[in-house]
Amino acid sequence: MTTERNDPLVFARETRADGLTILRQPAPPGSAGFAATYVAPAGWAFDPAGREGLSVMTSLLAPSAAGRRGRVALARELDRLGGSIERHCAPESAEVAVSGPASELEPLLGLLADVVLRPRFEADDLERVRRQIFERQLRESTQPGHRAERELLRAVFPKGHPYRASGLGERRTVARIRRKDIETFHEATAASDGGFLVLTTSRSLREVQRLADRLFSGFPTEHPVGFPRTEALRAPVRGARTVPMAGRTQTEIRLGGAAPPRSDPRFPSLFLANEVLGGRSMLNRLFQHVRERRGLAYHASSDLEAMRWGGYWTAQAGTGPERAAEVVRLMTVEVREIGTVPIPSAELDRTRESSIGEIPLSLETAADAHELAVDAAYHGLSDHYWKEWPPLLRATTAAAIREAAGPVYDLAHSTTVVAGPNA
């Protein structure tokens, strides 16, 4: 029988005197692995003017070489221990994660500490990463899907808003970034105050605390980079945008608008609205009505990005240029209905139970379960949140979903972007 102490859906946490929050999640029963993530307040919202792309470059560089190991030595040590290190950069935060066999937790956690606290930012790696960012910038400007997403965010959010950019900056801003810029940015943002260390392991919270105190010491104790004041930024006028892209064979469509933060009490209702609209694989309306029944699109889905400072929703589809107008029409109908017409009970129950059924599947490995813990840590969710989540979804009515979705999925406050040939 699984007790709370061993339940992967029940967490334990503490905040150290230096401000670092440590959250321990029990590894799933029988799991032979562990996972750990450090989350820093270091996303591209904190990029200094004229150095846009700095946070992404810092995030890409940190796992290349750290502590006593260069890039090759670090890669070989990870291979020897059977571990892997991943990183992710977002508007509000940057993450570095390590996973591997439970028997190698301490040495792998030591490598994570080196990456977080002692990255080397070597010159050769810097130029390699700079070229990678240039390539990503090129894809962003030349591929219809990337281009449509970029234009949608520019339409939804005003200049100065942290969600408006992709984090890649421009070629000129990335070209002028020097090693000193990266070192200064890292020192300012890899702080214990506002940071999170999340571990999914069979070891106790006390053992986790001891490991964290030994390996993750020497943090800067303050976060001197100011946090953006997003509440003072007004969204621009909505409308439609076209992006002609000669030589392309596929047209990408994006329809979207601003959404509330994760902390908003309407989140469960908006979550289910998105799942019905286009989030739940195969079951959602966009897939069924645009792709499956009519064969008008290569893909059709929707996303709800609910972050700390706010968020946005997106409905997306890819189609041939000759079918773009019809796909836009059908997508618009589906978005309008999700905020104005109650979802039939059979459809809502099917989608809701499918969503709830994903939770046990996410507990099959330590790495999968770990994502739930990182989400809970970053958004300040309760230690029992994922136990409370199914009853919360089952208590959410069709009327509550319509009431929440109406002002958010409002076509009068949304933007449609069409990118492709003959757009």
Image (spheres, rainbow, N blue to C red):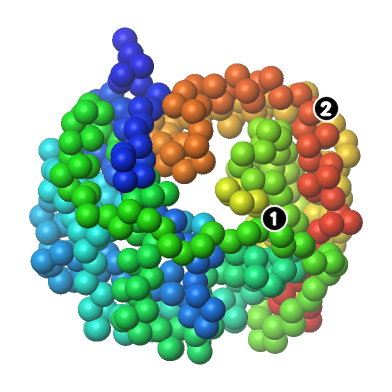
Which quadrant is home to the C terminus?
bottom right
Task: Provide the residue designation for mark 2.
Answer: 399
Mark 1 vs mark 2, CA separation in Å: 29 Å
Residue located 18% across and 31% down the image = 207
Q: Residue 275 versus residue 228: which sits nearer the camera?
A: 228
Residue located 79% across and 40% down the image = 405
The answer to whether residue 258 is above or below residue 247 is above
Task: Provide the residue designation for mark 1.
Answer: 231
Which quadrant is home to the N terminus?
top left
The answer to whether residue 21 is above or below residue 149 is above
Circle 1: element type = helix
Camera sees residue 293: no
Label 1 packing within 10 angstroms: few (<14), some (14-19), many (20+): few
Q: Amino acid at mark 2?
A: Ala
Earlier residue among tags 1 and 2: 1
Circle 2: element type = helix
Tag 1 and tag 2, C-beta contact below 8 Å = no
What numbered label is drawn on residue 22? none
The reply, left or right, for residue 172 in relation to residue 343 is left
The reply, left or right, for residue 286 in relation to residue 382 is right
- Based on the displayed image, in which of its 4 quarters is residue 27 positioned? top left
- Residue 349: horizontal and vertical position, in percent? 69, 24
Q: Nearer the viewer, mark 1 or mark 2?
A: 1
Residue located 21% across and 72% down the image = 120
The reply, left or right, for residue 36 in relation to residue 266 is left
